[in-house]
Image (tube, rainbow, N blue to C red):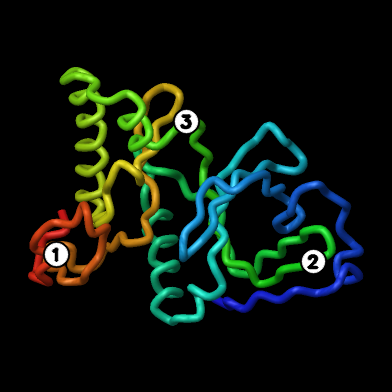
Amino acid sequence: MNSESNTNSASSQSSFEESAYPRLNNTYELIKILGEGSTAKVWLARLIEEPSKLFAIKIMNAKFLKMESSICSVKKEIKILKGLDHEGIIKLLEFGDSGIITSESKLFINQVFIVLEYVEGSLLFDLCKDNGAMGEDVGRYFLRQMIETMEYMNKKGVVHRDIKLENILVDKEMKLKFADFGFATNKSIDSLQSYRGTMSYMAPEIRRHDKYDGR
């Protein structure tokens, strides 16, 4: 992957139509930022030719990609998502490392991007925060979905390694979808020792740097 990002003058984008929003590859309009971290920004995007079609597009941070380990991590995330097909997992639709973003008088080239399905709804974290305790029936309803998704991933030889309420989306039909596979792996999942995850959710054996079964 080429992680370089360059900015040119307005004359460099003369072949592109004027738009109120930044455009990716003159195919998607980037409407607003859904989330932002040290590794990437996630945009709500729509198809230019069919604006009713919405997507979530992850644009990787150029500084993050300067490290070889980061490039390997992105490649692994893409490879893992390509191999998963389950209603409880966010779908990968497109990816590339030569994206072109046009924004006003600027042109950004060689952008690494991942196009994902857009889930209209909320995070499970926000749902729990806003509603508080929802009772055992709702708990079983959500937990059954999580277990089915995790069983599917285990059978596919994939472990997420950062399962938390903030990484689970809830659609309008109250169906859960696991997202953010940046820490996922499909190598030696029954004998891992890498320090991965979010500190406040991390299992004791991971914090101790012990070997652990990712499943």
Q: Amino acid at mark 2?
A: Lys
Total labels drawn: 3
Q: Residue at x 39, y 52 (%)?
A: 180
> Which residue lies under the disc numbered 2?
106
Name the element at disc 1. Answer: helix
Q: At which x and y percent is residue 135?
A: 19, 19
Quadrant position of the N terminus in the picture: bottom right
Marked residue nearer the N-terminal end (1 or 2) = 2
What is the spatial separation of the Cα atoms under label 1 and label 2, in whole angstroms? Answer: 44 Å
Please tell me which residue lies in front, 214 or 197: 197
| Residue type at tag 3 | Gly
- From the top left corner, tell me how far across and down residue 6 is, in percent: 71, 76
Q: Nearer the viewer, residue 73 or 38?
A: 38
Q: Quadrant of residue 189?
A: bottom left
The amino acid on which the numbered mark 1 sits, given as a three-letter code, is Ile
Discs 1, 3 touching: Cβ within 8 Å? no
The circle drawn on residue 206 is: 1
Foreground pick, 97 / 125: 125
Mark 2 burial class by Cα count in 10 Å: few <14, some 14-19, many 20+: some
